[in-house]
Structure formats: structure tokens, C-alpha cells
Amino acid sequence: MSVAEPRRIVLFRHAKADWPPVSDHERPLAERGRMDAAVAGRKLADTGIAFDLALCSTAVRTRETWKLAVHEFPERPKTVYEERIYDASPGELIALLNETPDDAQNVLLIGHNPGVQGLADILAGTAEGDARERMSRRGYPAAAFAVLSFSGSWKSLEPGVGTLVDYWAPSE
């Protein structure tokens, strides 16, 4: 693919987690989270985006979210479980995305707040329709996702280069 073709990044926050007496990294999904993850998967499939790559945090709740969401996809993308996503800042997430091979056009990142929301805010130099207003009004609740597009190589991804194309949250 040409680096001139628009690329898409979907920033997907894990679904609602439970609070058992385990480390934060080991927290599983709550019952509501399991339901929302499947619904989010259907909504992601409805976007029609054919993902080339999914980057998923190694935390239990993100892995469970991904397992339930991807079940709704027509095709499973290559999945990389990446420790660096857990507790990452927006800058650290950009650095990770800068490592993406240029043959990947559409990437899904399954992660955590505040990093995922911060990244969506930082990348979105512009927005289509009411996507920014909806994201601002709703915040970035569990199982929400933002769809951003940008042109250029993954190495050129930086603050403000993206367009917020869509936003969805479970209560939308």
C-alpha cells in the first residue's frame, strides 16, 4: 500500500472491569464488561474497517475485551499483545504506533485510560460531524472507541495529524 492512502487507528478502551483482590494488571472483566465488549465488537465490525493489526495490552481485562470483541469480526486481524500499552502515556502510545510496519493500513489499539483518551484528544487535529462533541460530552467510558484517520507513514504519526472520524460508547 502507498503511504499516501489514509490510515486508520481505532483506540478502544477495555470494557468494564471487576475489582477482585488481585493486582491491577490481573483484574478481569465484570459481567457488564463482558456484555459491552461483545456489543463494541459488533459496532467495530459495523464500521467495515478491515484491521491489519490489533495491538492489545497484556492486562487481563484488555485481553478479555479483545477476545469477546474480535469474535464479532468477519476476519481476525494479526494480534500482538504488547506490555508497553499497559499504563502508557499518549506519548508512549505514539512511540509504539511509530513502530508499526507501513504495510499495515488499519490498526486497532486496545488499551486503558487515561492513555487512550489522551491519545485520541492529542491526535485529532480535526473532526468530522459531531464526533468530537460526542467524545467530549461522553468522555471515554469503558468499551468506548474512537476512529481516527491520517495520511503518511506510521513513523510520521504525531499530535494533531489525525482526523477524528467517529466515536462510539456503550450508551450511544
Image (cartoon, rainbow, N blue to C red):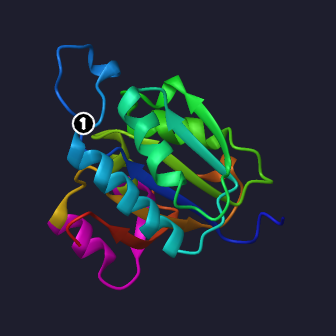
Depth check: 28 or 12 in front?
A: 28
Quadrant for the N terminus in the image: bottom right
Depth check: 170 or 114 in front?
A: 170
The magenta stretch spans residue 136: yes
Q: Is residue 85 left or right of residue 121?
A: right
Quadrant for the C terminus in the image: bottom left
The magenta stretch spans residue 32: no
Q: Residues within 10 Å of mark 1 (few under 14, many from 20)?
A: many
Q: Circle 1 is placed at which residue position?
A: 17
Q: Position of residue 153 (x, y in %)?
A: 72, 55
Residue type, mark 1 in image: Ala
Q: Position of residue 59 (x, y in %)?
A: 41, 26
Identified at 25% across, 55% down, the residue is 140
Give the farthest residue toward the right: 1
Identified at 17% across, 14% down, the residue is 21
Q: Is residue 143 left or right of residue 139?
A: right
Q: Position of residue 136 (x, y in %)?
A: 20, 65
Q: Position of residue 3 (x, y in %)?
A: 77, 63
Q: Is residue 119 left or right of residue 151?
A: left
Per the rendered image, the range of residues in magenta is 121-137
Identified at 28% across, 25% down, the residue is 27
Specify the quadrant of the image occupied by residue 42.
bottom left
Q: Please say if 145 is above or below 32.
A: below
Q: Is residue 143 visible?
A: no
Q: Is residue 22 visible?
A: yes
Q: Secondary structure at mark 1?
A: loop
Q: Please say if 172 is above or below 144.
A: below
